[in-house]
């Protein structure tokens, strides 16, 4: 198949390009090489079209394309409200421009990089009220070191559950809002064009080539960079917050599976969690990484960030059934390897 891969020079895009080539697919790569992600005068990978999808000659790039794999995006949590326009223009508007061009060119298959952040805080069960939305965590609780969310009905403690793709959208950051918007634009395009889309909701990506620590980096990059400087990872809250760390080569495999199967999916957006299926606490991840790096033990600081969610753990089942995808690298193996994996410097 001939695949237009946007964001082809990014952390995940580079791994997808290799996995596609290994599976015998032809890749047309495009990337804006944004300075905030790649620094000034970044090296240009072989064959890459350096262009911003908002202004690129997409009609030319889309000639003969079977599937678009759309990874180009501004990522991270966003630092503050001054970041809103950046997420909106690159992620929301960029996707709108791409879909309009796909409609003109008659390209009917899209694989979209989405994220677990579309769910907001994860799924919880209250002993009395069943599945409930967690109440917004109170500052008085957080300041007292009580980090677990409470039932929004009775204020009692609640237990986390795996989150499946039918959970409602509840974006908490501008980045999350832009990922929800991308899925919604894709849905509208599917309806208008009788087209097919798969949204891959990545959980916490890590692995070789991940960007070094920046204000927009995720926790794995922050801890790995701290250890490289000889510093202890600083674990927020009490370290018992839970995530699913999924290796970037597994994310690339999930994309290949989605690209190969999207045309057989319904003419709408089908979403899949892309996860290892093996939840890990942030504290345990920090300890394992520090041990593997031979670095100082993590410090649990008790600090917290208003936008953070407490536990978000994926159900990996839909991706097994719909894509035949199961992660090959669990966090025990992958996080140990991360201690020596090279990072990308800007
Ligand atoms: C992360 C990504 C998000 C992505 C999602 C799924 C970032 C900033 N966030 O969201 O873009 O869509 O994974 O792939 O890239 N923490 C510490 N110490 C630190 C930093 C963070 O303990 O120095 C803790 C936080 O309090 C939080 C957890 O680590 O509980 C995860 O934080 P982070 O990786 O920033 O965000 P996610 O919500 O997991």
Image (cartoon, helix red, strand yellow):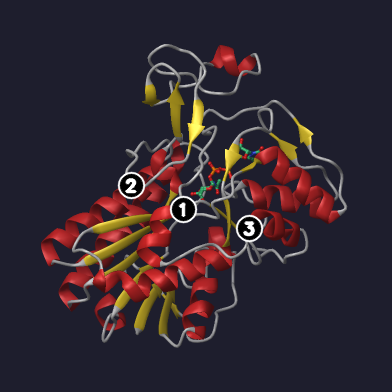
- Answer few, some or many: residues within 10 Å of disc 1's Cα (few below 14, many 20 plus, some between 14 and 19): many
Note whether residue 44 is visible: yes
Above or below, 221 relative to 104: above
Q: x, y (%) of residue 340?
A: 78, 63
Mark 3 secondary-structure assignment = loop
- Answer few, some or many: residues within 10 Å of disc 3's Cα (few below 14, many 20 plus, some between 14 and 19): some
Above or below, 31 relative to 2: above
The CA distance from mark 1 to mark 3 is 13 Å
Q: Relative to the observer, which residue lies in front, 126 or 110? A: 126
The answer to the question of whether label 1 and label 2 lie on touching residues, with beta carbons closer than 8 A, is: no
Q: Give me the disc on residue 180.
A: 2
Q: Relative to the observer, which residue lies in front, 315 or 18? A: 315
Q: Earlier in the sequence, mark 1 or mark 3?
A: 1
Above or below, 253 relative to 312: below
- Answer few, some or many: residues within 10 Å of disc 2's Cα (few below 14, many 20 plus, some between 14 and 19): many
Q: Give me the disc on residue 330.
A: 3
Note whether residue 229 is visible: no
The answer to the question of whether label 3 and label 2 lie on touching residues, with beta carbons closer than 8 A, is: no
Q: Is residue 250 toward the left or the right of residue 341 in the image?
A: left
According to the picture, the residue beneath numbered tag 1 turns out to be 316
Q: Residue at x 76, y 51 (%)?
A: 289
Q: Confirm if mark 1 falls within 8 A of ligand 1.
A: no
Q: Earlier in the sequence, mark 1 or mark 2?
A: 2
Above or below, 145 relative to 316: above
The answer to the question of whether label 1 and label 3 lie on touching residues, with beta carbons closer than 8 A, is: no
**Ligand 1 image-quadrant field:** top right
Q: Earlier in the sequence, mark 3 or mark 2?
A: 2
Q: Residue at x 22, y 71 (%)?
A: 101
């Amino acid at each position: 198949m001939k695949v237009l891969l946007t964001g082809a020079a990014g952390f995940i895009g580079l791994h997808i390009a290799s996995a596609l080539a290994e599976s015998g697919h032809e890749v047309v790569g495009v990337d804006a090489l944004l300075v905030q992600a790649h620094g000034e005068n970044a090296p240009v990978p072989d064959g890459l079209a350096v262009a911003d999808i908002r202004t690129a000659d997409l009609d030319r790039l889309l000639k003969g394309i079977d599937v678009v794999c759309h990874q180009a995006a501004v990522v991270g949590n966003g630092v503050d409200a001054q970041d809103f326009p950046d997420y909106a223009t690159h992620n929301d508007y960029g996707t709108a421009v791409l879909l309009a061009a796909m409609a003109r060119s008659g390209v009917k298959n899209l694989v979209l990089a989405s994220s677990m952040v579309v769910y907001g805080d994860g799924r919880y069960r209250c002993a009395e009220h069943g599945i409930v939305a967690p109440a917004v965590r109170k500052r008085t609780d957080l300041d007292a070191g009580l980090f677990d969310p409470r039932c929004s009905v009775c204020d009692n403690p609640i237990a986390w559950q795996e989150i499946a793709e039918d959970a409602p959208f509840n974006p908490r950051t501008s980045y999350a809002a832009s990922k929800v918007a991308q899925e919604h634009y894709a849905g509208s395009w599917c309806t208008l064009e009788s087209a097919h889309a798969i949204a891959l909701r990545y959980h916490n990506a890590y692995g070789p080539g991940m960007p070094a620590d920046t204000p927009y980096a995720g926790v794995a990059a922050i801890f790995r960079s701290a250890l490289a400087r000889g510093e202890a990872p600083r674990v927020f809250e009490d370290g018992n917050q839970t995530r699913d760390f999924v290796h970037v080569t597994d994310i690339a495999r999930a994309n290949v599976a989605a690209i190969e199967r999207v045309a057989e999916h319904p003419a709408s957006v089908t979403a899949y969690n892309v996860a290892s299926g093996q939840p890990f606490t942030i504290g345990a991840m920090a300890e394992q990484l520090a041990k593997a790096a031979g670095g100082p033990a993590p410090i649990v600081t008790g600090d917290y960030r208003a936008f953070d969610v407490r536990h978000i753990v994926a159900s990996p089942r839909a991706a097994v059934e719909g894509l035949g995808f199961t992660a090959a690298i669990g966090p025990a193996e992958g996080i140990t390897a991360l201690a020596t994996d090279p990072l990308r410097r800007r």
